Amino acid sequence: MEFKLLNFDVPMEISRIANVHYFEFKNEYQTIDDSHNFCELLYVEKGSICVYADNYSGILSDNQMIIHRAGETHSLQCNENIFPHVIIIGFECQAPQLDPFATSPITLQPAHRKMLAEIMKEGMNLFAPPYDIPNTLEMKKRSITPFGTAQMLKLNLEMFLITLVREYGSSSDSHKNACDNRLSEICNYIAEHYTERILLDNICFLFGMNKTSLCQNFRNEYGITILNYIDQLKLKDAKKLLRKGKLSVTEISEQLGFASVHYFSRYFKKHAGMSPKEYQAIQIASLP
């Protein structure tokens, strides 16, 4: 009896590893433009950094990651008074499925972060310290390593990247759909909380987006800024409550979360072209 053996399909393979770094950057630290013939995974464990690259420029904050493609020019800069903790892994991989991760950051979930921790553990088993020297051309290997360390590093990194491709999508269409879904979730969140004080930083944290991408994607999708969107919701509710005439202007102001009735009156006049009382009088006069 002859058994038929199945060959492995290997759509994504890490052929070589360049470095495994863990940095605690000083505030205002910055790098010069760099480009090399391997991919570079850039992950912010804590804090935030400004990223400048051919395919993406913007803020990368807590638990966000991007992958610079081979040959892509990139640099980073730390903000004032922020000391970010950053993981950088350089590796060789030709898989085009990684391309979407060069154009927009993703936020790693706890399961992803656990996988990344295993990668770092094997990386530190393979490479000797220090791990925080920028532009290290050749990281030194340890003289003694656990059995299969290099292979475990390769397999863990491949499994991590395959998992991300499966969950975030390997095409621009699926990546866009994921972004659209998040924008829809953000709109639902705003609809439930717009009478409260909503900060862009809070939305970024809750939905795993950086401020630049959030504002740009929201404006592209809806044609207005997030703040304008919130203004429209508040104005719509204010007009509805004024037409009913059951609440005073002060009560409406409080219900919609304005700091004071004076601020509400200025806000309403700016967007409606007349004061709340003028609007209410016109609406009541037009009733049959």
Image: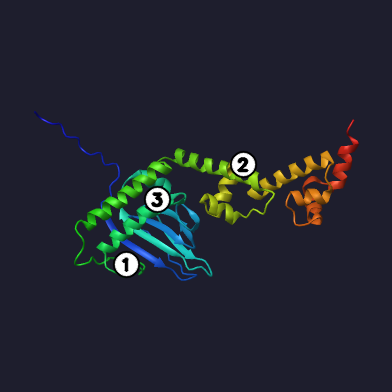
Marks 3/2: CA–CA distance:
32 Å
* Label 1 sits on residue: 136
Query: Please, what is the three-letter code of the amino acid marked with disc 3?
Result: Ala
Query: Please, what is the three-letter code of the amino acid marked with disc 2?
Result: Tyr
Q: Residue at x 35, y 63 (%)?
A: 21
User: Crowdedness of circle 2 by 10 Å Cα count: few (<14), some, many (20+)?
Assistant: few
Q: Residue furthest left?
A: 1
| CB atoms of marks 1 and 2 within 8 Å | no
Residue 235 on image: x %, y %: 75, 45
Q: Earlier in the sequence, mark 3 or mark 2?
A: 3
Relative height, residue 96 to residue 81 (above, below): above
Relative height, residue 169 to residue 112 (above, below): above
* Label 2 sits on residue: 222
Please, what secondary structure does the residue beneath circle 3 have?
A: helix
| CB atoms of marks 1 and 3 within 8 Å | no
Query: Please, what is the three-letter code of the amino acid marked with disc 1?
Result: Thr
Which mark identifies residue 111?
3
Residue 71 visible in the picture: no
Marks 1/2: CA–CA distance:
45 Å
Q: Earlier in the sequence, mark 1 or mark 3?
A: 3
| CB atoms of marks 3 and 2 within 8 Å | no
